[in-house]
Image (cartoon, rainbow, N blue to C red):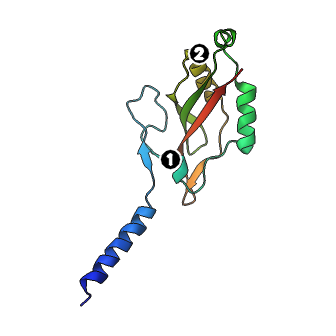
Amino acid sequence: MPNRLNILLLLVMTSVVAMSQVRHVTTVNPLSPNHSPYDAIEVYEYDYVDVQPQFPGGEHGLINFINRTREYPYHAYKNRIQGRVLCSFIVGVDGKVSNIRIIRGAQDESLNREALRVISEMPKWKAGKVGGQAVAVRCVLPIAFRL
């Protein structure tokens, strides 16, 4: 008959292994005003997938895309308003970007609108993967406006 210490040790080791395999998964709110094909599926967090989604051309391509696409709003430029807009979005299993949200906006609303526009114009990404399967992944991206 195994002693209690061995059983306790086995339970602790099993718990540690199980905890190391936990993935941070959420579901997209089906009542959101921005309905998309991803409303009823699980969405993985960027840091908890085996292979992260990738913009065409990688990080360098993403920076180039933002710099080419971003247009400084006239009012903000004229009044020398700067800021950073922190956005989140989901890269779906097909690579399409959806469910774009502002996590932390700039003081000027025109900068927030421009950041949303830039992300909405992104081309398809290479989808993230878990266990070799493509999955929807939530990404967070800052869009900076500097003069």
Q: Position of residue 115 (x, y in %)?
A: 61, 25
Q: Residues within 10 Å of mark 1 (few under 14, many from 20)?
A: some
Across the whole image, how many numbered discs are drawn on residues?
2
| Label 2, label 1: how far apart the Cα atoms are | 28 Å
Depth order, front residue of 147/137: 147
Residue 68 to residue 128: above or below? above
- In the image, which disc is placed on residue 110? 2
Q: Position of residue 54 (x, y in %)?
A: 66, 46
State the image quarter where residue 49 is shown: bottom right
In this figure, which residue is indicated by the disc labeled 1? Answer: 45
The residue positioned 70% from the left and 37% from the top of the image is 62
- Which element type, helix, strand or loop, lies under badge 2? helix
Residue type (three-letter) at the residue carrying disc 1: Glu
Depth order, front residue of 83/110: 83
Q: Position of residue 65 (x, y in %)?
A: 73, 32
The residue positioned 54% from the left and 18% from the top of the image is 107
Q: Residue furthest bottom?
A: 1
- Which element type, helix, strand or loop, lies under badge 1? strand
- In the image, which disc is placed on residue 146? none
Residue 131 to residue 27: above or below? below
The residue positioned 60% from the left and 33% from the top of the image is 142
